[in-house]
Image (cartoon, rainbow, N blue to C red):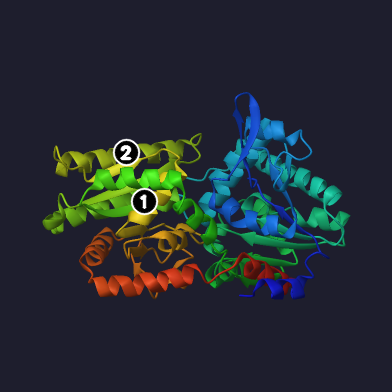
Amino acid sequence: MHDEAQVSEIAGLGVRPVVVVSNRGPTTFRIEAGELAAGAPAGGLARGLRPLVESTGGTWFACAVSEPDRMAAELDRPDPHIDVRLIAPDPDRYRNFYDVISNSTLWFLHHALWELPTSPRFGADWHEAWADYEAVNEEMAQVVADAAPQDAIILIQDYHFAIVAASVRARRPDVALVHFSHTPFTGPELMSVLPEHARTRLLTGLAAHDSCGFHTEKWASRFLACCDEFGVERPRTFASPLPADVAGIMDLAGSDVCSERFTALDQRLGTCRLILTSGRLELSKNLARAFNAYERLLETEPAHIGKVVFAAFVYSSRGGLPEYEAYRSHCETTADRINDRFGTDQWQPIWLDTDDDLARSVAGLRRYDVLVINPIRDGLNLVAFEGPAVNERNGVVLLSPEAGAHEQLEPAALTCPPFDIEATARQMARALDMSESERQSRANELTAIAHSGTIEGWLADHLTSIS
């Protein structure tokens, strides 16, 4: 990684403007007392990238994804703190772009969520949706090409805008184009499931960038393997994990509202130790198996009954998709069953809370004894860094090897295989029974790693990849 001075030396910041392109912007717009208000973003990507754009005076192009966003799209400067410009595609076209292709196809592809005997099914409706995906990418390309400053470095984020680059380059040969995948990347076997024209468009669209970045070498190598398998010329690639906004999460942890949430949480838990998972209620996050592993812990280690609470502070995601509604119901049913089986009048083993309350979630990060992060696949997982940065109890992190964060945190975290319930239960027991000296040693190492990355260094890795 590089420090801020090195970034300036490599990029000539202040000479080459920085532009970010993503689906969701850096601001959450809402209506308060009949007026449009701008607030902090909820997602980890926006929280991580916003400091970059603010510190460089750059521009952020994104989609209007809500009615307040559409109102903001009509304004020249909807957020006084950051230059965000929103496009507002036709709602039906955007629905196909976002729900059918981005969420139900590309997300499932890269996170290995398909059940191949029954899904996916690429019928006529899907092919129409793919045409809309291309159309929204083209709409964004036109806006960026028209408005990007001269010689800009355009940082295109994630699978939503995988095919923007060629169109921008045709109009603006002066700009540099870097794509960064915040998700994992699939290998050739699953990539072959996509219809040929979509697969070719996707891979050639990515290869049209000056370089393609990933959180880990593992994801980069899978992308290159897809290029080789399907006859697409390899672009430059680089691996650079996006650092968590540690300063921002620490500020929130020290805020009055977080302190109030922490006090309420601590009072509810009493002397109980806390196993925590936090983030989106998302198929790839594997919450139900984490509950199953906790149930197995209570079966095999009954001494923990009444003394440990598993809290899942998760917020709903993609509620319009039937797979997500079914999974949420499955998680709720699993939690209820375990609570009915083991709970008493004085103690409830699982605390499942789906309110979107960031301050409450950060209070949980301060209080956990064990943090469970067991995704099926995850491009990185910023909570794995945010948790150790604010935790006050030498908490142990259980981390799936399929999370990109595992590459950095593996020496200090405990590995929990995402499909192995028995192994995860054993790791939960190990974490709870660990000596205080080992907990402190591991926590110190995790905290040091969490503080080691900088957004300036992440940007410098982008710039080095095109120099």
The answer to whether residue 375 is left or right of residue 343 is right
From the image, tell me which residue sits under label 2.
332
| Distance in Å between CA atoms under marks 2 and 1 | 20 Å
> Helix, strand or loop at disc 1?
helix
* Residue neighbourhood size for the residue with mark 2, other residues' Cα within 10 Å, grouped as few (<14), some (14–19), many (≥20): some
Q: Position of residue 252 (x, y in %)?
A: 49, 51
In which quadrant is the N terminus drawn?
Answer: bottom right
> Helix, strand or loop at disc 2?
helix
Residues 205 and 388: in front is 388
Residue drawn at (81%, 60%), measured in percent from left and top?
152
From the image, tell me which residue sits under label 1.
364
Precedes in sequence: disc 2 or disc 1: 2
Residues 376 and 62: in front is 62
Residue 176 found in image quarter: bottom right
Residues 251 and 99: in front is 251
Residue drawn at (41%, 67%), measured in percent from left and top?
401
Q: Position of residue 395 (x, y in %)?
A: 32, 63
In which quadrant is the C terminus drawn?
Answer: bottom right
Residue drawn at (32%, 38%), measured in percent from left and top?
332
The single residue placed furthest to the top in the displayed view is 34
Q: Position of residue 233 (x, y in %)?
A: 72, 69
Counting every numbered tag in the picture gives 2
Q: Which mark is residue 354?
A: none
Q: Position of residue 283 (x, y in %)?
A: 43, 47
Looking at the image, can residue 313 be seen? no
Please name the amino acid that badge 1 sits on: Gly
Q: Nearer the viewer, mark 2 or mark 1?
A: 1
Residue 91 vertical placement versus 398 (above, below):
above
* Residue neighbourhood size for the residue with mark 1, other residues' Cα within 10 Å, grouped as few (<14), some (14–19), many (≥20): many
